[in-house]
Amino acid sequence: MRFFSDNAAPAHPKVIEAISASNQSSTAYDGDEWSQRLDAAFSTLFEREVRALWVSTGTAANCLALAALCPPYRSIVCHRDAHIEVDEAGAPGFFTGGAKLMLLEGEGAKVDAANVTTALDLIGKDVHQVQPAAISITNATEYGLVYRAHEVAALGELARARGLALHMDGARFANALATSGERPADVTWRAGVDAMSFGFIKNGGLNAEALILFRTELFDEVAVRRKRAGHLSSKGRMLAAQILALLEDGLWLQNARRANETAQLLAQAVPARLAYPVEANEVFLHVTPDEALHLRSQGFDFYDWRPGEIRLVTSWDQEGDPVERLAAAIATL
């Protein structure tokens, strides 16, 4: 009974159907009809012209965007628990050619305009210190907390005032919007976001993520960087087809709502054990090692987070008996 990661969830049947439909002779790389539809599909979703590229991993989507926003000799401001810091094996430095990550504190892996301002003010304006070029936030965060539009806008305003770019890691962007109910445009470009990764693999995709550029002039550079990084798939139509299938009729948001609702069922079973509010599809619980062992002995799979804390992640495909059994098992600890 899997609650280890939404990365392990199956691909949605409509995604498999879309891959099969694209399994025909066509133009290679991104010249096919599916890839050519991405810009329009995302422009409709975000209510303005954007440029969109498929890539095969979220790490590539994040780091290709950051490489276009930050030169090698500058830095990227992010939370110390951000995915780009703790889970991407130094990929930001690799893709940017050496840019530094400037790490900040913040409850639930969130940064806000106040603590970013404080950190920026401590940097000397001389050649002896690395100067920042970008701010990166994750929505939903590594602890499942959701940035609302006004929070992103405060960071966007700060970024503009300081001459910085703003990047959003949207690996669980769908889950964030399923909770907030806000329009994709309001929590991204209208709030000052320049580029983002839009996650699909955790939400019913197979091996396709989207890199969205609100600063469309960055497209040519990012396209070259994608090729140079080894992410220009010759059969890219199969990646584009997955993304289009999940965008169609709002399936991406439906899947996220289902995962979020499942997380709420678990959270409601043991509110006193919650380490953080449950705002997306991740549930962090205070559990002793013996209690964790007891849950595993019953067949539940999950991630040991910090000492005395476990992480449960729900997925678009989970419902019914396993969820109810886990909720009951936790409630009886």
Image: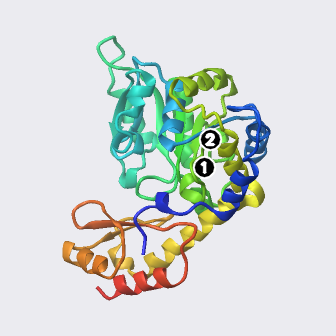
- Find residue 124 and report its horizontal and vertical position in percent: 32, 19
Residue at image position (60%, 49%) is 149
- Find residue 112 and report its horizontal and vertical position in percent: 45, 44
Amino acid at dot 1:
Ala
Q: Which residue is mark 1?
A: 149
Q: Residues within 10 Å of mark 1 (few under 14, many from 20)?
A: some
Q: How is the image coloured?
A: rainbow
In front of the other: 322 or 176: 322
Where 26 falls versus 200 (above or below)? Answer: above
In front of the other: 37 or 102: 37
- Point out the residue furthest to the top here: 127
Where 11 falls versus 103 (above or below)? Answer: below
- Find residue 221 and report its horizontal and vertical position in percent: 61, 20
Q: Secondary structure at mark 1?
A: helix
* CB contact under 8 Å: marks 1 and 2: yes
Q: Which residue is mark 2?
A: 191
- Find residue 314 and report its horizontal and vertical position in percent: 49, 68
Q: Check the picture and name the quadrant holding the C terminus.
A: bottom left
Q: Is residue 311 left or right of residue 27?
A: left
- Point out the residue furthest to the front here: 25
In front of the other: 22 or 45: 22
Q: Check the picture and name the quadrant holding the N terminus.
A: bottom left
Q: Is residue 250 left or right of residue 57?
A: right
Q: Secondary structure at mark 2?
A: helix
Residue at image position (39%, 45%) is 82
Residue at image position (59%, 46%) is 208
Amino acid at dot 2:
Ala
Residue at image position (50%, 30%) is 66
- Tell me how far mark 1 sits from mark 2, CA to CA: 7 Å
Where 245 falls versus 9 (above or below)? Answer: above
